[in-house]
Image (spheres, rainbow, N blue to C red):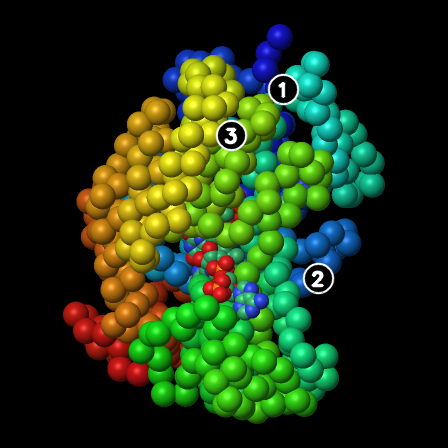
Amino acid sequence: MTLRVGIIGAGPSGMAQLRAFESARQNGADIPEIMCFEKQDDWGGQWNSSWRTGLDAHGEPVHTSMYRHLWSNGPKECLEFSDYSFDEHFGRAISSFPPRAVLFDYIKGRVEKSDVRKYVQFNTVARHTSYNPEAEEFTLMVEDLATGTTTEHVFDKLVVSTGHFAFPSVPEFNGINSFPGEVLHAHDFRGAERFAGKNLLMIGSSYSAEDIGMQAHKMGAASITFSYRTAPMGFDWPENTVERPLVTHFEGSTAHFSDGTHGEFDAVVLCTGYQHKYPFLPSDLTLKSKNVLYPANLYKGVVWQQNTNLFYLGAQDQYYTFNMFDAQAWFARDVMTGTIELPSLAEREADVQLWLERQGALPDHNSEADFQSDYLRELIEATNYPPFDLDAVSQLFKDWMGHKETDILGYRDMVHRSVVTGTMATRHHTRWLNAMDDSLGRYLGGPSQDVDTGTLSAVTGEFSAK
Ligand code: FAD
Ligand code: NAP
């Protein structure tokens, strides 16, 4: 009987799994019966963003946490597919830090080229899963959101690719209930225009805090205060930006910090991260993890230890993204089809432990980038995913982190070289700080007459003036 594979979620990870099978088919292999279920009406996951917050038109939790004016926060050269370059997609060199719509276009381009959309049932949400160990089969119940009809499907292999940045972690703070201004989590943030002239408190010290805070600065916020739990980000912030330790409590619109300082705020954005949540899975198949580079209980970061018919893609914290999902999907495909034979549970456990020990000793961000590069290396060496220079990408990550240290408002104006094609990125026509139109058309079509493109010359070889 033909192998039956179910894929839950058609974001970049699910799309990578579809592409992995398509690649095998193009190479002459017989491929399994594939069904992919996506609760939204299009693929792209986070990148298929929406103005909606809370519940979507079907009453389902809105998945995307992306927002207007979101530009890539890492160099695109670090996430490039090795079998579908940016040059191939756009037909010309582009800048290193494109906005969301441009990256969305790129990831769609690859799957649209192959005939894989037919495998995806859109507007269809995974509701419930059970596993029959005797038959070694999953029964997945899904709901067609347009009709409300539920159906059951039986699979030999199940791929969970539903992402882990959609269910916010929302801590409690004394007195926040009486804060008179707006309080929201980054998941519900859709644009900083309304923060112009406001005093903004961001709780958290990672990518969301940094990016939303600097977008607020770009949109004219009066002041930005970051409140950290563990460590400050420590960038050379613009003058209206400070970092404080954690909020102890609120009194009206005043926030008190653990160093004894306090401040008055108009709005609070909780940039406090996300939970791994898989409500369609029974607890014995559910990954429980913090946002880490190597979640426990997944062999090679992909295969569920106690049931090797279950696969998770993209469950890691992410330096690499699209190309890592590819490497994982190629690996998962080869395990599913038996091309890769799995070692015993004890050997797999020992392997996972080695990675966890190494993860536990990572001293800094540079070594984290090397760690994830080494992880990809193992996956790629085990499969026929087209290899690319991982050491060069790791160096790109380090250069990028160095640029952020030098100029947090200007790092997106820097350019990097593709390790896939050797093409040097072009400088964007408008520096990030001035770019107020993040559409694909504006990005490809040239500068707006409404912005100061003259400052482009300021970044030709130099960083921004704050
Ligand atoms: P997702 O993109 O989350 O896709 C999961 C898919 O599963 C969604 O389409 C969802 O609708 C679907 N789904 C969920 N539950 C169900 C269900 N029960 N049934 C059916 N379908 C379901 N990465 C970068 O490389 N560069 C960036 O600049 C960048 N910016 C980011 C900004 C934000 C705010 C966030 C949150 C993430 C960002 N990322 C960025 C990382 C991003 O997570 C990855 O690029 C990528 O989207 C992860 O792909 P995924 O397929 O694993 O998950
Ligand atoms: P994250 O990286 O997991 O960071 C969560 C942050 O919340 C950490 O600083 C953590 O502090 C803090 N935190 C958690 N619980 C807290 C609590 N109770 N009190 C105070 N602080 C708390 O999550 P994220 O920043 O939302 O990033 C998620 C993903 O989105 C990343 O992949 C990122 O790249 C992506 N992203 C990209 C962009 C872009 O520009 N393209 C923008 C936003 C986000 P500790 O350090 O103390 O744990």
Earlier in the chain: of badge 2 and badge 3, it is 2
Tell me: residue 397, above or below residue 221: above
Callout 1: few (<14), some (14-19), or many (20+) C-alpha neighbours within 10 Å? some
Label 3: how many Cα within 10 Å (few below 14, some 14–19, many 20+): many
User: Which marked residue is nearer to the observer: mark 1 or mark 2?
Assistant: 1
> Can residue 409 be seen in the rendering of this structure?
no
| Occupied quadrant, residue 186 | bottom right
Between the residue at mark 1 and the residue at mark 3, the CA separation in whole angstroms equals 14 Å
Placement of 63 over or under 131, stated as above or below:
below
Q: Which residue is mark 2?
A: 54
Q: Which mark is residue 303?
A: 3
> Disc count in the image?
3
Question: Which of pointers 1 and 3 lies earlier in the amino acid sequence?
Answer: 1
Camera-side residue of 279 and 342:
342
Amino acid at pointer 2: Gly
Using the rendered image of the protein, determine whether residue 146 is visible from the camera's viewpoint: yes
Location of residue 411 in the rendering, given as x and y in whole percent from the top left corner: 30, 67
| Residue furthest out toward the left | 461
The residue wearing badge 1 is 156
Q: Residue at x 33, y 74 (%)?
A: 235
- Kindly identify the amino acid type of the residue bearing the numbered disc 1: Asp
Disc 1 to disc 2, C-alpha distance = 34 Å
Q: Residues within 10 Å of mark 2 (few under 14, many from 20)?
A: few
Answer whether labels 1 and 2 touch (C-beta < 8 Å).
no
